[in-house]
Amino acid sequence: MERKFYEKYTALKKRKLLDEGLERKREAELKELLDAMKDWVSGLEKDKEELSEKLADKEDELEKTRQDFLVDIRARDSEILRLKQLLDEKTEKNNSTATQSVEQAQVIQENPTRVSPRRKTPQSSSKAKRVLWTENTDISQEQECSRRHTCLTGNGTNECPSAHMFHLLLQSLVRMKITVHDGTEGFLVSVSHEATGTYSC
């Protein structure tokens, strides 16, 4: 009887030892698994911090790029506005110059024989006197020539005032006095410049 109890006790004790061994082994495995999970979580937290720092750097870089882009856009807008103002001023100046040129051309067309005043000098005064004397002489000669000038019409002769008007118009255009002398040896043409007093035949 005692022997049976002893065997039963021994069997229970072995089972207990086996169970305790398995329990210790299981505890060791669980502890190892827990440590591995702690290391994994720690690594994840470290990676998260690094990614957060990189994300912050990228956000700062993006904000700086955006600010630089806005500054560049403002500078370009200012340059475009400045160039547009310069173009408008140049266009307005060209239009004003063209208008003045047209007005000057109209004034010249309306007053083609107007001569700008010059400063009087002793030499120019003597030239003016000589030109005045020449003009008076030419006028008297023109009047005489106009009275004597005739043109043929059929079998008779009539006065031709159109020739005298053409003569005066030619003088006005070239700004020179042109006189035709009807002598015994033929026609003699004399030309005198009003401003310089030059006289030629």
Image: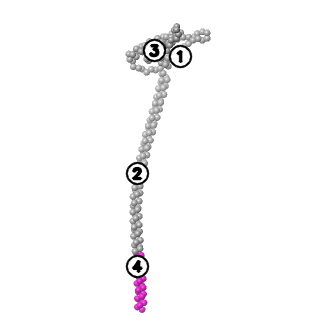
Question: Residue 67 at what x, y percent from top left?
Answer: 41, 49
Q: Can residue 145 be spotted in the picture?
A: no
Q: Which mark is residue 199?
A: 3
Q: Amino acid at mark 1?
A: Phe
Packing grade of label 3 (10 A; few <14, some 14-19, many >=20) is some
Which residue is at the far top? 184
Which residue is at the far front? 185
Given this view, does label 3 or label 1 mark the residue nearer the observer?
3
For label 1, the SS is helix
Whether residue 115 appears in magenta in the rendering, the answer is no
Nearer-N-terminus badge (3/1): 1
Question: Residue 102 at what x, y percent from top left?
Answer: 48, 28
Q: CA distance from mark 1 to mark 4?
A: 147 Å
The structure residue drawn at horizontal position 41% and vertical position 15%, both measured from the top left corner, is 127
Nearer-N-terminus badge (3/2): 2
The structure residue drawn at horizontal position 42% and vertical position 92%, both measured from the top left corner, is 1
Packing grade of label 1 (10 A; few <14, some 14-19, many >=20) is few
Circle 4 residue: 21
Q: CA distance from mark 4 to mark 3?
A: 148 Å
Circle 2 residue: 64
Q: Amino acid at mark 2?
A: Lys
Could you say which is closer to the camera, residue 111 or residue 33?
33
Residue 88 picture quarter: top left
